[in-house]
Image (spheres, rainbow, N blue to C red):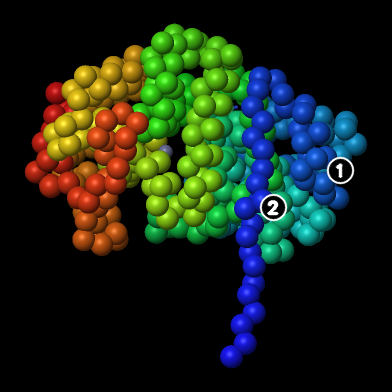
Amino acid sequence: MKKIKVNLDKKVSSSYEICIGYDIVDRIGLIIAKNLPARHYLIITDSNVSALYGEAFLNRLRGMGISVDMIDFPAGEDSKNITAALAIVERMIELGADRSSALLALGGGVVGDMTGFIASTFMRSVPYINVPTTLMAQVDSSIGGKTAIDLPEGKNLLGTFYQPKGVVIDVKFLDTLPEVEFHNGLAEVIKYGIIEDIELFRFLEEHVRAIKERDCEILVKIIENSCRIKKGIVEIDEKDKGLRRILNFGHTIGHAIEAESHYTVAHGVAISLGMVAAVRISEKLYDLPGEERNRIENLMKTVGLPCRIPHTVTNNGILSRLKMDKKKEGSVIHFVLLKKMGMPFINGGVPESVLGETLEGMRK
Ligand SMILES: NC(=O)c1ccc[n+]([C@@H]2O[C@H](COP(=O)([O-])OP(=O)(O)OC[C@H]3O[C@@H](n4cnc5c(N)ncnc54)[C@H](O)[C@@H]3O)[C@@H](O)[C@H]2O)c1
Ligand SMILES: [Zn+2]
């Protein structure tokens, strides 16, 4: 028997830079020239972002002598599907896209996930750069190379791991972001503070007002810290086999609440509730200090995230969603809980009575 080894250590070649600043979008020309030289570029965006920034972005790139076109699709999670992806690909082909093309994802997590998915599969992959325009995408979805589209059977069921060639985060985009979307991203930032960085948590506590006013210097700082945390975790566990799971803090119960509300409860609100539940369970079962639980709940309240479950979502509904997860995952649901702030761990199952009591407590 002969053996031929296919060496695929991609670590160096798949590394990339994240650039963060206020009003830096012009630098994209330089970044493209350095990291993503292609014959032809395609901006993929959604209808909202296109109306706000599309023309200006397109013209800026064309003004730099770059050959570029733009494709947009209707904004919203409902577009994150195979039909919309195929429509984009057909348009790409009409516009002459081939293996020497590159994609630029201009938008929130939906645009980023879809564009990454198309980039990873179109002609067996073309490179792409993320230009995230929501806080959620700037602190979370644009980094780490998880791409996906939804199927009727569930969210993110068809996807790949495919890293971008670069991420350009211009905090100026957040000037126009609706409040509810801003809160979605803020919930993820608080999550990073709780699981990984007490300094970030303290910084958030001290700058609530500036954050609410979207002070650009403060935002640049918290986005930079968030990106550092996410990239640190992704570097260790790119394919989500271990450590990356701590990023699911608040998401197990959060997803159950989101789904049970038929997605009328926003992601950020749902995971805030999930984080409060996880913190209270941690206090009950693992002696998380009550003082830390208080700090976490207080920060949520002061930034405007809820700690109470809306009555449109029942405890039984949440519990049966969790049981459905349990069937998918095996015998137990793994929750991310806390020994203390900055010390998350994956727990091997929470008794249903504790879950029920905790949810009940979050209605008072
Ligand atoms: N790949 C990952 O690792 C990862 C991580 C977390 C979430 N996600 C995915 O991200 C998606 C959610 O992302 P999202 O929260 O950014 O939602 P989104 O992309 O739907 O954007 C939210 C809304 O804000 C609008 N918008 C975007 N930028 C704007 C701006 N600057 N000004 C005004 N409006 C703007 C959009 O048009 C949209 O209506 C979900 O599909 C989720 O599965 C992926
Ligand atoms: Zn999330």
SS state under label 1: loop
| Residue 4 image point, x, y percent | 64, 79
Please give the residue where the numbered disc 2 appears in the rendered image. Answer: 13
Name the image quarter holding residue 355: top left
Give the mark count. 2
Q: Which of 172 and 95 lies nearest the eye of the viewer? A: 172
Q: Is residue 164 above or below residue 306?
A: below
Q: Nearer the viewer, mark 2 or mark 1?
A: 2
Amino acid tagged 2:
Ser
Compute the Cα span from label 2 to label 1. Answer: 25 Å
C-beta proximity under 8 Å, tags 2 and 1: no
Q: Is residue 348 above or below residue 139?
A: below
Q: Is residue 195 above or below residue 316?
A: above
Name the image quarter holding residue 124: bottom right
Q: In this view of the protein, can residue 262 be seen by the observer?
A: no
- What residue is at 21 percent from the left and 61 percent from the top? 331
Q: Residues within 10 Å of mark 1 (few under 14, many from 20)?
A: some
Q: Name the mark on residue 67.
A: 1
SS state under label 2: loop
- What residue is at 25 percent from the left and 62 percent from the top? 330
| Residue 54 image point, x, y percent | 72, 32
Amino acid tagged 1:
Ser
